[in-house]
Image (cartoon, helix red, strand yellow):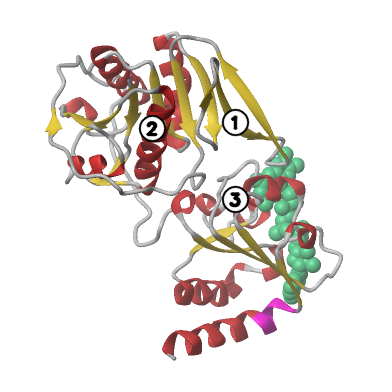
Amino acid sequence: MVLVFAETVKGGFKKAAFEAVTYGAKTAAVLGTDCAAVVLGEADNAGQLGEYGASKVYQLKSDHLANFDSQVYTAAIAGAADKIGASVVILSHSSTGKSLMGRLAARMKAGAVAAVNAVPTNDGSFKVRKPVFSGKAFATYEVSADKKVLSVMGNSIQPEATGAAVAVESLDVDVPAPRVRVKEVKRVEGVVPLPEAELVVSAGRGMKGPDNWGIIEELATVMGATTACSRPVADSDWRPHHEHVGQTGVAIRPNLYIAIGISGAIQHLAGVNSSKTIVVINKDPEAPFFKAADYGVVADLFDVVPRLTESLKKFKAS
Ligand SMILES: Cc1cc2nc3c(=O)[nH]c(=O)nc-3n(C[C@H](O)[C@H](O)[C@H](O)COP(=O)(O)OP(=O)(O)OC[C@H]3O[C@@H](n4cnc5c(N)ncnc54)[C@H](O)[C@@H]3O)c2cc1C
């Protein structure tokens, strides 16, 4: 049995949850078994995970699950896996999944591979692929442990709703009390979070200062995109830290990444070069980012960005 932990936010599923269940269902098919999903805490419509390939959906409800706590969630997921006899557990490669992975693998005595981006093969041995060296190469890992924990890289699989909703069942699993008390939760509201965004407009030090960000926000609003930035921009407090992408920031894989006034240093590229299409706007034709770009515009951003926004407005209106 394959068990997928489906992440929720404010009672709704994250896109990553549908990706993970789709991945889990495909993995189960490769292994000749079934895929179940587990939901921790409140969820509006947990049964819809059946549409993405879960033949069973289990929901654990407990006051102890009200806030994310990696020790409590690990115990709950490991308990659910044990109860249903799951030998493979699938997580999303999100901040939540990353903080669960090591604990869960240790508790289950499982082999773990983080950030996989392809469905495993099983020709006598269980092999799974992941990107390495900042996305420059792929490595195939063979997992010989009986139990396995995998985390699925965001946007590496399209959610496929080809099935039907299923009834939600409960499971008798011991959920321990958290040892950390949450006093306050602050959420970024109103925008698609960067790890889930399909369109990202990102800007760097070429913007000259925080007061110039209006043109970036306007472009992002017209496109329905999420904004991001390079590290020095966040370090200088021009933009909030949750927007910082790259090796030391958020790693993203949107369908479209527009990089404006960003040089394309290796540490920046490490977090964005798996984007499906990269557009670079930079006035320096020698900027390293152009080597990673699908489309490049050599121009002054203060000239080209407002014109791009106006063109998009006209295009949308027509
Ligand atoms: C250990 C380590 C980790 C790091 N992690 C990260 C990370 O996670 N993310 C990250 O982003 N960086 C990271 N960095 C920093 C990284 O090395 C670069 O310094 C940084 O990415 C540069 O940011 P930038 O491109 O915004 O600025 P710059 O390098 O200053 O580039 C600005 C660009 O804007 C262009 N420009 C200027 N004016 C205009 C204009 N009017 N119109 C058009 N273009 C213009 C310039 O030609 C230039 O290419 C890390 C560094 C280290 C050492």
Q: Is residue 180 above or below residue 41?
A: above
Q: Are marks 2 and 1 in contact (CB under 8 Å)?
A: no
Q: Is residue 293 above or below residue 97?
A: below
Q: Is residue 258 left or right of residue 39?
A: right
Q: Which residue lies at the image location 60% right of the left edge and 33% below the top edge?
A: 130
- Mark 2 crowd level (few <14, some 14–19, many ≥20, 10 Å Cα): many
Q: Which residue lies at the image location 36% right of the left edge and 34% below the top edge?
A: 25
Magenta-colored span: 300-304
Which amino acid type is shown beneath numbered disc 3? Val
Q: How far apart are labels 2 and 3 at the CA level?
A: 28 Å
Q: How far apart are labels 2 and 1 at the CA level?
A: 15 Å
Q: Which mark is residue 24?
A: 2
Camera sees residue 93 = yes
Q: Which mark is residue 129?
A: 1
Q: Position of residue 97 (x, y in %)?
A: 43, 32
Which secondary structure type mostly characterizes the magenta part of the structure? helix
Q: Position of residue 284 (x, y in %)?
A: 83, 70
Foreground tag (2 vs 3): 2
Q: Which structural element holds mark 3?
A: loop
Q: Which residue lies at the image location 54% right of the left edge and 87% below the top edge?
A: 310
- Mark 1 crowd level (few <14, some 14–19, many ≥20, 10 Å Cα): some
Q: Which residue is mark 3?
A: 245
